Amino acid sequence: MSINPKEIPTGAVRYNTDSNKMEVYIGSTWMEVAVSSPNLNGGTRGMFHGGGSNPGSDVVGYNVIQMINISSQGDSTDFGDLLNPTQYAGACSSRNRSIIFGGQTPSANPQDVIQFTTIASQGNSQDFGNMSEVIASSKSASNNTRAVMGSGYNPSPSFTSKKFLDFITIASTGNANDFGDLARTRVQCFSFGSPTRGIWGGGYYTNNGGAASSPYAGQQIDGLSFITIASTGDAVEYGDLVYTGTNAQIRGAGCSNSTRGLKAGGNSNPYYGEIHSFNIPSLGNGVEFGDLNESREFMGATASAVRGVWAGGNAGPYAGQVSIQYAQIATEGKSVDFGDLSTGVTRYPSGSSNGHGGL
């Protein structure tokens, strides 16, 4: 039974589940409580790093780092710069640091560079160390201590998909160490994780070191692999994706809270617009969750405990996008508009946050 407004005492506080905001009753109406501070008590900070944009070209990259408050809505704002313009990079994070690794420079050369930023502050990234492989389009999972990164490709001298896994201790600096291998090579896949598990899904593999045939016939990967982040060793395969279209497994973007992973988008025709969910503790098959507000491939993704957020991406051949969209992880349904990227059109950004499912 609802409370008559006349019975609500002035100064009463409530949590509005529709807006995800705290509100206080001022005698005639509910007003949002302002929650903003330099130490991020106002909400989880999401980060988007680099990306590319130039219709008809794959070699123009951004060095900009952008940030959002995942608990609110609005356009991204400037955080700082990467060491160099980078697209196809990977990213992960602890509560304090965002880690950016690999990717391609504007000259289309892959790199093995690992760099980091301090999430609570703003400024340019700093050098962390190097990966064991020169790699682009690598994916990762992390908890508050360790990051595990792997998969991806080296485009030169021939396009070769990879199955290696590296790990780093996020609070330190230095070169990555060998963790193990994925069960098969993967490129343009997605990943997410919990505090204990990292999961890689979808993507495709190349034959004999050469590029996949179009439309990746016989080379798409329907399954997933998982690791235990605190240990080392090879990944274990399990489960299947929700397969509902040609190339739907490829170029999707993943994020999660501690129990549910979401994969959105992909390289279908037209570009894939579905969101699929995965129960991380049970390691089962994917199930349908809802739809993107705007169909995309090559998006950047990040999350808080409540929301999954996707930014940028392609909506057509080299048709980069500015929009950011989000979904409530605990429910099912269609994503809604969050705002826009401040750089404008961005393809292939990478995402991280200080409140994702691994923390």
Image (cartoon, helix red, strand yellow):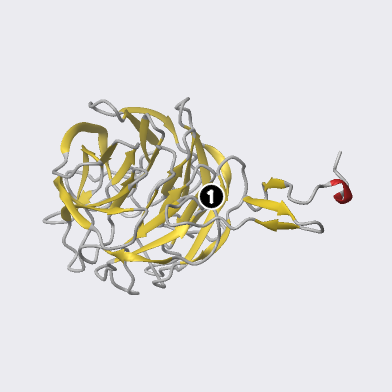
Residue 317 in the image: state x and y as whole percent: 39, 67
Q: Residue at x 29, y 68 (%)?
A: 62
| 217 lies left or right of 233 | right
Say which amino acid is labelled 1.
Glu
Nearest to the observer: residue 324 or residue 277: 324
| 110 lies left or right of 356 | left
Please tell me whether residue 161 is drawn above or below residue 32 in the rendered image.
Answer: above
Q: Residue at x 28, y 72 (%)?
A: 57
Residue 26 in the image: state x and y as whole percent: 76, 57
Instruction: Specify whether residue 265 is in view.
Output: no
Label 1 Cα crowd, 10 Å radius (few <14 / some 14-19 / many 20+): many
Please tell me whether residue 281 is drawn above or below residue 213 in the rendered image.
Answer: above
Please tell me whether residue 358 is drawn above or below residue 237 in the rendered image.
Answer: below
Q: Quadrant of the N terminus?
A: top right
Circle 1 — which element?
A: strand
- Where is mark 1, residue-wise? 274
Nearest to the observer: residue 206 or residue 77: 77
Q: Quadrant of residue 81?
A: bottom left
